[in-house]
Amino acid sequence: MNSTSSFGDTGIAAASRPQRRISARSALRASGTLWLLVAVLGQLLLAIYVVGFYGLSAAQGRLEDWAKVLPQGVVPGQRFLNTVLSLHLLFVVVIIVGGALQLLPWLRRTRPGFHRWSGRLYLLAAGILSVGGLILVWGRGTVGDLSQHLAISLNALLILGFSAIAWQQARVRCVEAHRRWALRLFLAVSGVWFFRIGLMLWIVVNQGPAGFDPKSFTGPFLTFLSFAQYLLPLAVLELYFRTLERGHAPAQALMAGAMLVMSLATVGGIGAATAIMWLPRF
């Protein structure tokens, strides 16, 4: 009697464990998808801002308006660097829209040819964007100190490296590896966006600048954020991959909860950046 009861309990427990694991795994996938959706929508807001402010002012011949946002905007006599800056802003829009298209699963399934060609354009835009960033940082100079310039340079090198690996994996048809490297590239390319929403959220939470000097745009927090803007999302992605593959149900459930918290923080950062940085320019 007792042995039969124990056997039955064990059988029920054994049957429920895979179910709990599947449920936790599904929750983790759903939380990852939710964050990605929030990020894509937030980046589209940045693209709208770039087109609406930089594009519109350029079309109306008011390039001097760029200097209101960019300390080293259009500089008379620096035709090459001015062109690099204009292309840099253009490819910000291209890469945001291209990244959103690359992440649509139904587009990959139903329009594989379009996915491949838009992917090539995305990789090209990522390369141009990163090289242009290096030229602007070290050729013209920008706000911030040496630590921030080094962080930008490392970000650019990671973008170039991830682009090469993602392209190589696509060539040899390692689909899963290609998707993972494409996600790493997406996060690395998004560093500029992460910086803005992270900084604005930090300012809102602290009710003003904290840990940095807004006039010189230097300080320990900005040094941290300059590296964290891409290294932290990349670290979270690797943890997500490992938990999804090898994590037990409790670990997957915990990671799913963490992803939900990050989605809320991302929404907060997007709202802060929109209200403080983007909307006032229109």
Image (cartoon, rainbow, N blue to C red):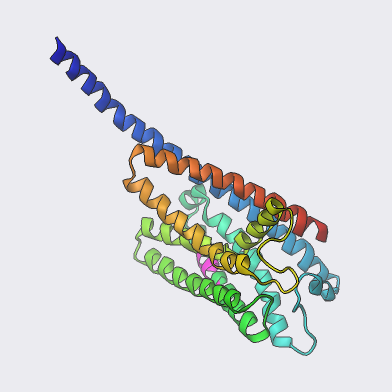
Query: Where in the figure is residue 215, as x and y percent of width and height?
Result: 75, 72
Identified at 48% across, 52% down, the residue is 108
> Where residue 247 sits in the image (x, y, percent)?
34, 44
Q: Is residue 111 above or below residue 158?
A: above
Indicate the quadrant where residue 14 lies: top left
Q: Is residue 230 left or right of residue 75?
A: left
Q: In the depicted view, which residue is nearer to us: 216 or 102?
A: 216
Q: Which residues are magenta?
A: 119-124
Residue that sits furthest to the top in the current view: 1
Residue drawn where x is 61% and y is 68% of the image: 220
Asked whether, in this view, residue 73 is left or right of residue 28, the answer is: right
Q: Residue at x 31, y 47 (%)?
A: 246
- Which of the 4 image quadrants contains residue 153? bottom right
Residue 61: image location, x then y, percent: 85, 74
Q: How many marks?
A: 0
Quarter of the image with the C terminus is bottom right
By secondary structure, the bulk of the magenta-drawn segment is best described as helix
Q: Quadrant of the N terminus?
A: top left
- The reply, left or right, for residue 63 in relation to residue 175 is right
Q: Is residue 238 above or below residue 148?
A: above
One can see residue 44 in this view: no
- When the figure is inspected, residue 161 is found, relative to residue 112, above or below; the finding is below
